[in-house]
Amino acid sequence: MITLQRRQLAGHDILLARHGNHICSMRVDRSNDRVVALLDDGSVDSAPNLIAPGIKLPETVGSVLREDWKLLTAWGGMAAAMAVLMTGAAVALGTTADPATLEMLTAYTAY
């Protein structure tokens, strides 16, 4: 099941396990793929974000859109086409049908 949540970096978890409440701030060093923490005693510690090379991370909205954009576009196009067809049918029915048929269609929901 797709959770569509923000990906939690593994480095955050590693640093929290190491130092707990002694962390003042954390930042992500994207060039080295690490999380760097400033500790309350002034020292700095870092941890890698990659635990295993083949790890499957949770899906995000961006990753789903990147992978499935063709399918989502096709579904959106089909929904728009159905909306146009149904609107056209309703307009055509309203302008060409006799009044008895229109009254029957509007009173149908009363039963």
Image (cartoon, rainbow, N blue to C red):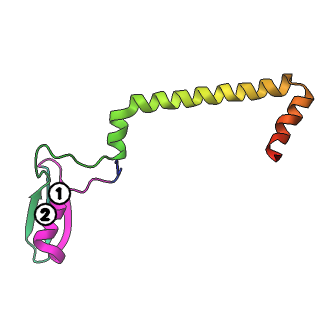
- Residue at the spot 10% in from the left edge and 59% down from the top edge: 47
Element type where label 1 sits in the image: helix
Instruction: Report the residue that reaches farthest toward the right.
Output: 99
Point out residue 55 in the picture as x, y percentages from the top left corner.
16, 46
- Residue at the spot 66% in from the left edge and 25% down from the top edge: 85
Q: Is residue 69 above or below residue 44?
A: above
- Residue at the spot 19% in from the left edge and 64% down from the top edge: 26
Q: How many other residues sit within 10 Å of disc 1, few (<14), some (14-19) or many (≥20)? A: some
Q: Nearer the viewer, residue 31 or 84?
A: 84
- Residue at the spot 89% in from the left edge and 35% down from the top edge: 103
Labels 2 & 1 near each other (Cβ < 8 A): yes
Point out residue 93 in the picture as x, y percentages from the top left corner.
80, 26
* Magenta highlight range: 6-32
Q: Is residue 74 magenta?
A: no
| Label 2 to label 1: alpha-carbon separation | 6 Å
Label drawn at residue 62: none
Element type where label 2 sits in the image: helix
Q: Which residue is mark 2?
A: 14
Q: Is residue 27 magenta?
A: yes
Q: Nearer the viewer, residue 103 or 12?
A: 103
Direction from residue 3 to residue 40 in the image, left or right: left
Label drawn at residue 10: 1
What amino acid is found at the position of numbered circle 2 in the picture?
Answer: Ile
